[in-house]
Image (tube, rainbow, N blue to C red):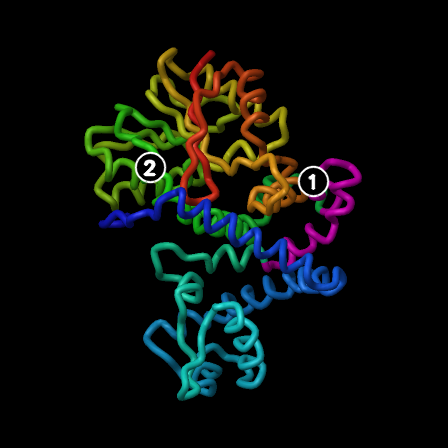
């Protein structure tokens, strides 16, 4: 758990930079011949694989103690020196790693995100998104678009989450990736919303408790309940105890399709609803609604897809959900209607400096 609270840039500045970046990208694609712009975009998949390879080899970890020559780095990670140079040459062009004037390779801020031991590490995310099963599923995107259904049942005979539970290599890879991604937007969320107003917060499907622990560190008068599947709950219990929160945070076990703890003042669903098809997501909301007091609040933390033509991470992750889980990302209006069908009133959508938003709702 972080001991200091990083300062967030003003949201207006972040939004302005996003608009400028998007405008420059659009202008560039209009200026160059269309086929060249498309060819450049097609290379994005190769770049993902290059980042995956660097993460798998542990290049960032090998540079944690300082710059190294190509020969030394290749020996450390067990790679061919020339091939490693060619890999890093590509990544350096995108700001991942750098090569000093003396020829030694070194970390950049982006490369540090591929280390195992940093507070916000994307190494596990890189390993998952570049993995063979993820590539294989995405190669069937056209099938998902034709049918409107995820590809897991046709390819593996079961849904993605069933596959992850059955194949623990995949399950561990996915769990670790989601934990690393979950840490990305934590500071922006805490800067944008006052969780301390609630006496008891229930984090539904909160993993090992990283977010709830950070919330409680900033809300010393609040208590927490972490609700998770039995196979995750033991790790969460140990983590919260290690952080000195055992007296303020309990861990309860179960499935959010069946029941969730009653009596909380706020219920948090972070990156939960988008994972599931509409009917299943509705069942989750119904379970939470049944446990809530009339004056409790539901806090949904998700990407909210803007209703414009600009590029946005939610539009990409929406297809990730289509391919793998059958879930979806939603616009604010779609959330408003979806919540209304499940017995909730959407009060407000609170943006953060990250792509995540906080949707605050109450029982209707």
The image quarter containing residue 110 is bottom left
Mark seen at residue 100 = none
Q: Secondary structure at mark 1?
A: loop
**Residue 326 in magenta stretch:** no
**What secondary structure is the stretch in magenta mostly built from?**
helix
How many marks on residues? 2
Q: Which residue is mark 2?
A: 212
Task: Indicate the position of residue 79 as horizontal and vertical percent values.
Answer: 53, 80
Task: Identify the residue shown where x is 52% and y is 59%.
Answer: 126
Is residue 235 shown to the viewer in this render? no
The image quarter containing residue 299 is top left
229 or 184: nearer the viewer: 184
Task: Indicate the position of residue 215 as horizontal and vertical percent values.
Answer: 30, 37
Task: Identify the residue shown where x is 35% and y is 43%.
Answer: 210
- Is 304 left, or right, of 354 in this rendering? right
**Residue 139 in magenta stretch:** yes
Task: Identify the residue shown where x is 44% and y is 14%.
Answer: 363
Is residue 137 shown to the viewer in this render? yes
Mark seen at residue 150 = 1
5 or 332: nearer the viewer: 332
- CA gap, disc 1 to disc 2? 31 Å
105 or 192: nearer the viewer: 192
Point out the stretch of residues depicted in magenta: 130-155
Dot 1 or dot 2, earlier in sequence: 1
Task: Indicate the position of residue 40 as horizontal and vertical percent values.
Answer: 67, 64
45 or 355: nearer the viewer: 355
């Amino acid at each position: 758990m972080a001991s200091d609270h990083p300062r967030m840039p003003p949201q207006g500045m972040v939004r302005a930079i996003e608009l400028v970046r998007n405008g420059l990208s659009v202008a560039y694609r209009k200026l160059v011949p269309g086929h060249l712009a498309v060819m450049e975009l097609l290379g994005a998949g190769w770049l993902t694989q290059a980042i995956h390879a660097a993460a798998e080899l542990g290049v960032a970890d090998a540079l944690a103690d300082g710059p190294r020559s190509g020969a030394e780095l290749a020996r450390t990670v067990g790679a061919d020196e020339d091939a490693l140079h060619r890999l890093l040459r590509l990544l350096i062009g995108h700001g991942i790693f750098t090569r000093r004037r003396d020829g030694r390779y070194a970390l950049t801020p982006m490369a540090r995100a591929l280390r195992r031991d940093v507070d916000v590490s994307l190494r596990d995310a890189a390993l998952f998104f570049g993995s063979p099963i993820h590539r294989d599923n995405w190669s069937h995107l056209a099938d998902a678009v034709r049918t409107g259904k995820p590809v897991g049942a046709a390819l593996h005979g079961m849904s993605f989450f069933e596959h992850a539970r059955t194949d623990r290599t995949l399950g561990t890879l996915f769990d670790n990736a989601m934990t690393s991604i979950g840490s990305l937007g934590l500071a922006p969320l805490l800067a944008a919303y006052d969780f301390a107003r609630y006496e008891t917060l229930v984090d539904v499907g909160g993993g090992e408790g990283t977010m709830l622990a950070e919330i409680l560190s900033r809300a010393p008068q609040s208590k927490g309940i972490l609700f998770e599947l039995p196979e995750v709950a033991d790790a969460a219990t140990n983590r919260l105890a290690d952080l000195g929160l055992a007296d303020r945070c309990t861990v309860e076990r179960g499935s959010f399709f069946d029941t969730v703890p009653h009596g909380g003042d706020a219920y948090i669903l972070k990156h939960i609803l988008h994972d599931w098809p509409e009917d299943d997501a509705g069942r989750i909301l119904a379970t939470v609604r049944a446990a809530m007091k009339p004056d409790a609040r539901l806090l949904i933390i998700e990407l909210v897809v803007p209703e414009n033509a600009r590029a946005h991470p939610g539009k990409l992750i929406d297809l990730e959900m289509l391919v793998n889980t059958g879930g979806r990302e939603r616009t604010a209006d779609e959330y408003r209607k979806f919540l209304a069908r499940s017995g909730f009133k959407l009060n407000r959508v609170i943006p953060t400096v990250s792509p995540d938003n906080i949707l605050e709702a109450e029982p209707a």
